[in-house]
Image (spheres, helix red, strand yellow):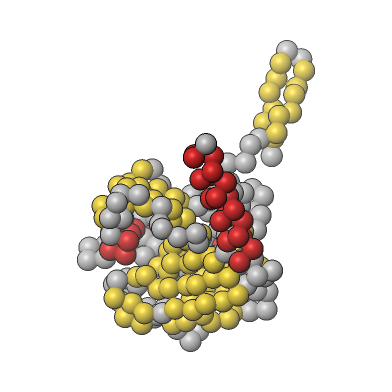
């Protein structure tokens, strides 16, 4: 798409920049936690909303939840470890060793998390419990792989993909935060799913708290070595 700017009788075509898009997260109904409350319950502290982000959480006030793009043309594949902001939206993921942990479930439906590497649903785990007292964990080596995230009712039934073009209602059912400020060299994500079909006025509450999981991308040993070397160089410079 291009913007057309007329200067006298000359028409110049100027390429439009790629703009980030964020899916709207609606308020949670009474008795259910919203994203800010889930962050505080899991990471502690007192988070504050800042646009679509949350900042100032954790015991030292250093943890932030930075909302990742839900749409960003072109829809490139998102490198799960150490991505560049604005490089890709959250539909397609690639390349990393991951540890996935259930964080919250505010839903009447059962919840199961999986991935699709191109050949259909592969289950990671079903979620036990509810509210913030949930269970479910898996570790996967997806080095060199690309995938979509899938949330579905346990054992089948209604299924929603991180790629909204694969959803029956054509809507986005997963919003993503990158969690920063934790004492780790992992790249940490929070994936938040909506489990009801349709728009807000069509039966779904669109609050994206039905299933929430944390994903930690574990750096390779070679990457750890580079981080260590970089730290030593920084320390030497400070001493000088």
Which residue ends up furthest to the top in the rendered image? 8
Q: Position of residue 83 (x, y in %)?
A: 58, 53
For the question of whether residue 71 can be seen, the reply is no
**Residue at the spot 40% in from the left edge and 68% down from the top edge:** 212
Between 133 and 144, which is closer to the camera in this rendering?
Answer: 144
The picture places residue 203, in percent across and down from the top left corner, at: 38, 66
Tell me the residue at 36%/79% (across/down). 135
Say which of 45 and 9 sits in front: 45
Give the image location of residue 129, x and y in percent.
Answer: 31, 80
Q: Is residue 111 shown left or right of residue 83?
A: left
Residue 113 seen in the figure: yes
- Decide: is 207 above or below 128: above
| Relative image position of residue 215 (x, y in whole percent) | 48, 67
Q: Could you tell me which quadrant the N terminus lies in?
A: top right
Q: With respect to residue 103, does 4 lie above or below?
A: above
- The residue depicted at 37 percent of the width and 70 percent of the height is 103
Q: Residue at x 37, y 52 (%)?
A: 63
Which residue, as the protein is rendered here, is positioned at the far left? 31
User: Quick one: 159 or 40, which is closer to the camera?
Assistant: 40
* Quadrant of residue 109 within the rendered picture: bottom left
């Amino acid at each position: 798409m291009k913007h057309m700017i007329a200067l006298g009788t000359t028409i110049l075509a100027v390429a439009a920049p790629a703009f980030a898009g964020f899916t709207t997260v609606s308020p949670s109904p009474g008795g259910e936690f919203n994203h800010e409350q889930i962050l505080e319950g899991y990471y502690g502290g007192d988070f504050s909303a800042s646009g679509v982000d949350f900042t100032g959480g954790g015991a030292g006030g250093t943890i932030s939840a930075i909302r990742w793009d839900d749409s960003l043309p072109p829809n490139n594949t998102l490198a799960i470890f150490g991505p560049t902001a604005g490089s890709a939206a959250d539909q397609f993921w690639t390349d990393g060793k991951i540890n996935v942990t259930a964080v919250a479930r505010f839903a009447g439906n059962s919840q199961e998390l999986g991935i699709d590497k191109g050949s259909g649903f592969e289950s990671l785990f079903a979620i036990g419990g509810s509210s913030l007292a949930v269970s479910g964990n898996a570790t996967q080596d997806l080095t060199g792989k690309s995938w979509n995230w899938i949330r579905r009712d346990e054992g089948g039934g209604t299924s929603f993909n991180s790629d909204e073009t694969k959803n029956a209602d054509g809507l986005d059912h997963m919003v993503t935060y990158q969690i920063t400020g934790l004492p780790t060299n992992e790249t940490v994500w929070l994936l938040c799913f909506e489990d009801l079909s349709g728009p807000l006025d069509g039966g779904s509450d669109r609050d994206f708290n039905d299933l929430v999981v944390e994903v930690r991308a574990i750096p390779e040993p070679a990457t750890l070595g580079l981080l260590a070397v970089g730290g030593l160089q920084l320390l030497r410079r400070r001493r000088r």
